[in-house]
Amino acid sequence: MNKIFKIVGIVLLLIVTFIVFGNRTSLKPFDLDEAISNGTLINMHGFITNLDSLDNFVKDIENRKDSEIEIVHYTIEGDPIIHILKYENNVIHSTLDPRHDQFGNSDVIKEEYDSIEVKEVHRNETIYKQYKLTSDNEESIFFTYELGIEETPVNEIEGSYFSTESDKTGLVELLKINDEVWVHRTYYDYNGKKVSSNGLVIISSDMLVMVDTPWTNEQTETLITLAEEHFARAFSLAFVTHAHMDRMGGIDTLLDKGINVQSSELTIVEAEKNGFAKPEFMLNENMYMPIRGKAFEFYYPGEGHAKDNMVLWLPDSKILYGACLVKSLKSKTLGSLADANIEAWPQSLVNLKERYPNADTVIPGHGEWGSSELIDHTLELLLTTEEGFNSEVFKLYVKKNDKLNEGQSEGYGAKLYEIYKLHKINVIICLAELPEYKELAMSHIAVAMGVKEKWIKERESLNQLIGSNEINDEEISTVKLFNSVLDNYIYNGL
């Protein structure tokens, strides 16, 4: 009889276990990398990835457009809690799934709400952004993140330029952008030429943050001494945007001093390949993080100057640190292309420009900073390389410059002609798809040619192209239009 009771007890225990834990055992393991790639909003103890997904979801609701977002909060123990919001037919359907949390409830909670309320909340001198689901009878705060400190106690620093120089390190400079953001600049003999390199020093209330190191460990040591002397704070944290000498040549000095160095997983892989010490992996492709009341957003727009090039956005100052993905206005070349992806680079810049249209200051990896014109200039440099033609980027370039007046258009026409000489057929194909822009663009090219002999020679070349099998009927029509533009200049001059 006792044996029967034991068997019944075991069966009952198994039934209860299945009821309590059955929901968990059938779960597919949560894949963080896949979730990030799919645009899932991740909150890992205040380090936030894909924050823009939430803003897009709120905009869709404002525009009464069906939309969906997956939000994942990580517990202290490292378990994901999944929250799916789906907006459909003017109703927000909320599904909270805690089944991956080994210490939490296993019940999936489903509710419906009418709207989302977004507001700033002030607590203990810190500003938070709060997102709340609301309905007639209920409300639920589902996401909050730190924006910054109300009054950051960073005293104004006297002076806007500090430097030191020695035979061992050369010139090490600090140049002021604002009270809290400074450019550090160092120099290195590269291929027989002295090349400057930019990084950032960011000042918070009680610490310094370095973004990219100088070229060498010795220069990094000098920079640390210079900055800590003038800013009366110590470096506690550093970020590396990609694995080249001008970004992380001083990493050994940082690690020796116990400074926490972080980068993306891809940069760690490239760092090992290039013989550098490994930073700690903390940066996802699209990560927002508050650091001592300062907002940092790291973004990976795609390959370009390097496979792993990330950028930093400082929303409080509207400063975009483009590192080597972006070239200064004085740059005549794209610099080192040893690890570059010329084909992908233009689209990465378009991604950058679309993501940060309100950037007031854009800081390149080398040379002087300026406005978002630096991104446009880098695009122009790419379009005038043999490998760098991108049809969508070219069409954007033509549309952007279509309204220039005569005094402004000379440089554009010369650049357009340069692109045309390198990528004639691609340019014709693109212009065929831009009926309202193509005639003016052709006129710019013809004016840039400048002399009758070139117009005649180009018309002959275009006639040969019409007789080939390289272009379709619409593109042939575009070539004939260009011929008529050339005829006008041949017979009437400029």
Image: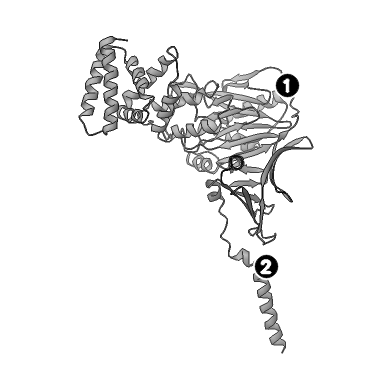
Front-most of 241 and 470?
Answer: 470
Viewer-nearest of labels 2 and 1? 2
Q: Earlier in the sequence, mark 2 or mark 1?
A: 2
What's the residue type where badge 1 is placed? Glu
Query: Farthest residue toward the bottom?
Result: 1
Crowding around mark 2 (Cα neighbors within 10 Å: few <14, some 14 to 19, many 20+) is few
Q: Is residue 164 left or right of residue 354?
A: right
Give the image quarter of residue 251.
Answer: top right
In this rendering, the answer to whether 128 lies above or below 140 is above
- Amino acid type, residue under disc 2 in the picture: Val
Other residues around mark 1 within 10 Å, as few (<14) / some (14–19) / many (≥20): few
| Horizontal and vertical percent position of residue 282 | 60, 43
Q: Seen in the image, is 437 located left or right of residue 76?
A: left
Badge 1 is on which residue?
156
Using residue 31 as the reference point, say whether residue 430 is left or right of it. left
**Badge number at residue 316:** none
Could you tell me if residue 390 is visible in this image? no
Tell me if residue 380 comes above or below residue 309 in the rendering: above
Pick the quarter of the image with the C terminus. Answer: top left
At x 53%, y 27%, the residue is 365
Q: 8 and 141: which one is in front?
A: 141
Residue at figure coordinates x 29%, y 13% from the top left: 489
Residue 135 is at least partly visible in this image: yes
The one nearer the camera, 477 or 197, is: 477
Q: Which residue occupies the foreground of this view, 423 or 489?
A: 489
Q: Position of residue 213 (x, y in %)?
A: 58, 31
Mark 2 = which residue? Answer: 20
Tag 1 secondary structure: loop
Q: Position of residue 71 (x, y in %)?
A: 62, 49
* Quadrant position of the N terminus in the picture: bottom right
Residue 148: x and y, percent?
Answer: 71, 34
